[in-house]
Amino acid sequence: MQFAGNRKQAMELTEEARRLDLADRYLNAHASKYIFKVDDTKRAEDTMRMFSREDDNGVINVHEM
């Protein structure tokens, strides 16, 4: 899938795909990656938090994704 540098559109489309199947870990990780690319760190972390576990300090472990 090529977006020719249009990161905002890529984020919107991957987010739409993620919302079609909220139980799909791959789509969640993929959407999170594109949300990070538009510098929306808080939203990306909230999206990743759906499938990750937090350590004792409350930090999410993205390597489990």
Image: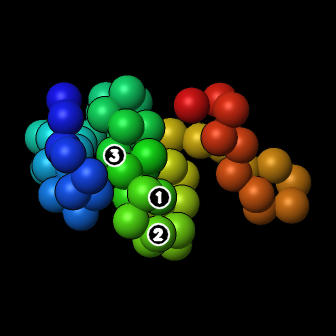
**Location of residue 31 in the rendering, given as x and y in whole percent from the top left corner:** 33, 46
- Is residue 36 rendered to the left or right of residue 65? left
> What label does residue 31 carry, if any?
3
Sequence-earlier tag: 2 or 3: 3
Vertical arrangement, residue 43 with respect to residue 33, above or below: below
Relative height, residue 37 to residue 25 (above, below): below
Of the pair 33 and 43, the residue shown nearer to us:
33
The amino acid at mark 1 is Phe
The residue lying furthest to the front in this view is: 4
Dots 1 and 3: beta carbons under 8 Å? no
Q: Nearer the viewer, residue 29 or 21?
A: 29
Which residue matches tag 1? 36
Q: Residues within 10 Å of mark 2 (few under 14, many from 20)?
A: few
| Mark 3 Cα shell of 10 Å, populated few (<14), some (14-19), many (≥20) | many
Q: Quadrant of residue 7?
A: bottom left
Which numbered disc flags the more N-terminal residue, 1 or 3? 3
Kind of element beneath mark 1: helix
Read off the residue under disc 2. Answer: 39
Residue at the (21%, 57%) spot, across then down? 6
Q: Position of residue 33 (x, y in %)?
A: 44, 46
Task: Using the numbered discs, state the Cα–Cα distance from disc 1 to disc 3 in whole angstroms.
Answer: 9 Å
Label 1, residues with CA under 10 Å away: few <14, some 14-19, many ≥20:
some
At label 2, the amino acid type is Asp
Task: Please give left or right for residue 55 compared with residue 25 in the image.
Answer: right
Question: Any mark on residue 1, and which?
Answer: none
Q: Secondary structure at mark 3?
A: helix
Q: Position of residue 38 (x, y in %)?
A: 38, 65
Residue at 44% x, 71% y: name it: 40
According to the image, what is the colour scheme of the structure? rainbow
In-image side of 48 versus 17 (left or right): right
